[in-house]
Amino acid sequence: MCGIVGVISKTPVNQLIYDALLLLQHRGQDAAGIVTAGPDARGTKFFMHKARGMVRDVFRTRNMRALPGTIGLGQVRYPTAGNAYSEEEAQPFYVNAPFGLVLVHNGNLTNAHALRQELFAIDRRHINTESDSEVLLNVLAHELEQAARNHPLTPDEIFAAVRAVHRRVKGSYAVICLIAGHGLLAFRDPYGIRPLCLGEGDGPDGRTVMVASESVALEGTGHRLVRDVQPGEALFIDLDGQVHAAQCAERIDPHPCLFEYVYLARPDSVMDGISVYQARLNMGETLAQRVISTMPPSEIDVVIPIPESSRPAAMQLAQKIGKPYREGFVKNRYVGRTFIMPGQSVRKKSVRQKLNAIGCEFKGRRVLLVDDSIVRGTTSKEIVQMAREAGASKVYLASAAPPVRFPNVYGIDMPTKGELVASGRTTEEVRQIIGADALIYQDLEAMKRAVAQLNPSLKGFEASCFDGCYVTGDVSPADFEAIETQRRTQQTEDEAEARGRLSLQSAGDVL
């Protein structure tokens, strides 16, 4: 899960991309990057700045001044493949031929290892990082070079290259690529697993076209949502802002990620024709039915959400079961989302820094806590304990998502079964680990129906973390063994790097 944005305008785009990245910050907090093209009218020179950290920390005034041009793109990174602590793996990625390409990518390639070998042995291309995004960039670069070898680059040649990319690449990918001197290319995998949408705006100097991961990045920067980029579709936006579109996949099978609606996306976004907020309200209704079928509502005194993604579901649940809704936790907005923090020790430590209980809402009450999902169980266990310490007589926990039992290989940081508290365990066993008096999970099929009714044209969702079904059809047990080995090695390296940074900081403080 990352946030990406691309813009073509008649005026400088550095501030516009910065503002869009702030609106997408929830999609990644590890690193941020912006590239612009200009200052000449054809946009043939690139200017880039990227680094680890939040958007507001990565870009200072001097950095923004060094990003001229009226065309550009940006990304906020949440690492799911590669080294989380590497500055080199921050996006955008650049390759100088053909034309000069800069790319940002949201998703995860499931055949990245095979492609890496193929690129070196056959395409004669070198990959310098562990990032699958650099692999994707080089596949695209090779196919563009093949498509436009003997004639000028036109939208037809660009779309031919994207068709070849679809044939070679497997997994999830929403991509925006800046082609020097030509314009912006955006495309989405044939399943539409990761989101991407098109918007436009009218400024005093002319029309602006923007492509972004979520509609909130468009609307928050004064643009209007035109439509989603369809699964398998490619858009090419030339330097005059004209949009060319073509379906480039041989076969499409729309399956947007269900977890986007549960947790990842902002509630004020609309993705694939579905309001994220309304989807979460609907999840609250179906969860209420599960609660009623599990325990009498008379045993519940109050419904309290675990901020912030669970609020819509919790409000709707409380209304359906006829119990008061209360805010029982105050969130420190200056601590990052615990779900995307590397390492269990860092995640566990951050929970109490992030949330504090309002004692009067808990004391002597039988409390139903509502969370959007339970992934590793670390946060849930801490929060249940906080509720008890605040005086709750009973603590029940309801999850607006079904049990997360399976690894995700499409760009969400839950790649090993050993990290998932529900993997191989019954609901009762999970309840005991978390320490709640009752644990109620959402029903998967009911949740799918609740979201799908908001866009009947969608026939399915990517829900592999819940049901173990991988829509791309190329994931095997051997892949998971390799991923788990890589994951354990990477976690060891990341934690060692984190300890090293803390040691250096402590030494600096002493000096």
Image: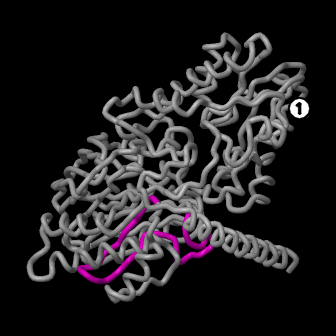
**Residue at the image position 19 percent from the left and 56 percent from the top:** 241
- Please tell me how crowded label 1 is: few (under 14), some (14-19), or many (20+) other residues with Cα within 10 Å: many
**Residue at the image position 52 percent from the left and 62 percent from the top:** 476
Mark 1 secondary-structure assignment: helix
**Residue at the image position 26 percent from the left and 62 percent from the top:** 185
Report the coloring of the rendering: one colour
Furthest residue toward front: 477
Q: Nearer the viewer, residue 285 or 13?
A: 285
Residue 284 appearing in the image: yes
- The residue that disc 1 covers is 388
Which amino acid lies under the numbered mark 1 shown in the image of this protein?
Answer: Arg
Per the rendered image, the range of residues in magenta is 80-107
- Examine the structure image and report whether residue 90 is included in the region drawn in magenta: yes
Image spot of residue 435 (x, y percent) = 85, 37
- Examine the structure image and report whether residue 469 is included in the region drawn in magenta: no
| Image side of residue 171 versus residue 317, left or right | left
- Residue 98: image quadrant is bottom left
**Residue at the image position 88 percent from the left and 30 percent from the top:** 390
Across the whole image, how many numbered discs are drawn on residues? 1
Image spot of residue 236 (x, y percent) = 21, 60
Image spot of residue 446 (x, y percent) = 52, 27
| Image side of residue 77 versus residue 229, left or right | right
Instruction: For the C terminus, give its image quadrant.
Output: bottom right
Furthest residue toward left: 151
- Residue 503: image quadrant is bottom right
